[in-house]
Image (tube, rainbow, N blue to C red):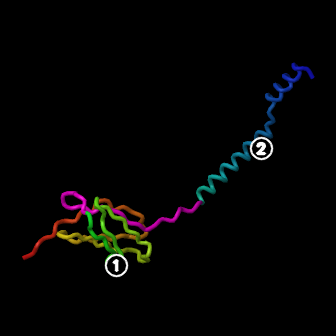
Amino acid sequence: MKDDDFSNYTSSMMLTLNPLKLTLFFGVIGCLLLNLEANAQKLPKPPTSPIVKGQIIDKDASPIPGATIIVKGTTTGTASDLNGFFELDLTKFTEKKVTLVMRYIGTEVKEVDVVLKDLPKSYGQIKLNDAVLQD
């Protein structure tokens, strides 16, 4: 076979594509892609932890460090950090809803209802107002 014969042969092979083979090839690729997409939609969501977060602030929007956040009727709780932020894991609770009680010296007590199925969730800034002194 001469060099010219070889180049003519390879050129003719490249130009002559078998429609049946092309259809089969793209059909298989299409099925694989559809199968991947279907399997991706069936993947379960990763489990989430029932964690509530927030920041305790005063009436002037300054952070309150050391404020206590306790689940009402229990001893489960935490305290806010130096910037007023807190994070509380509510994994051990099986009720649909719990109430968080937030306290700090010289402020009113604030209660926030938390629906466990909505967690994890950030409650953003939670303002504690100054306590009203009674005579």
Q: Which residue is drawn at 66% across and 51% down?
A: 34
> Which mark, by number, is residue 24?
2
- State the residue lying farthest toward the bottom: 73
Real-space Cα separation, disc 1 to disc 2, in angstroms: 67 Å
40 displayed left or right of 121? right
- For label 1, the crowd category at 10 Å Cα-Cα, with few meaning under 14, some 14 to 19 and many 20 or more, is few
Q: Quadrant of residue 65?
A: bottom left
Give the main secondary structure of the magenta stretch: loop
Q: Residue 11 carries which label?
A: none
Q: Say if the magenta span includes residue 76.
A: no
Q: Nearer the viewer, residue 63 or 71?
A: 63
Residue 56 in the image: state x and y as whole percent: 27, 63
Q: Give the range drawn in magenta.
A: 43-64
Q: The C terminus lies in which quarter of the figure?
A: bottom left
Residue 7 versus residue 133 in the image, above or below: above
Mark 1 lies on a secondary structure that is: loop
Q: Is mark 2 on a helix, strand or loop?
A: helix
The residue drawn where x is 59% and y is 60% is 43
Inspect the image, locate mark 2, and give the three-letter code of the amino acid beneath it.
Leu
Whether residue 46 is in magenta: the answer is yes
> Looking at this view, is 68 or 82 the one in front?
82
Tell me where residue 41 sits by quadrant: bottom right
Q: Mark 1 points at which residue?
A: 75
Please give the count of numbered marks on the rendered protein: 2
Badge 2, how many Cα within 10 Å: few under 14, some, many 20+? few
Tell whether 11 sits left or right of 40. Answer: right
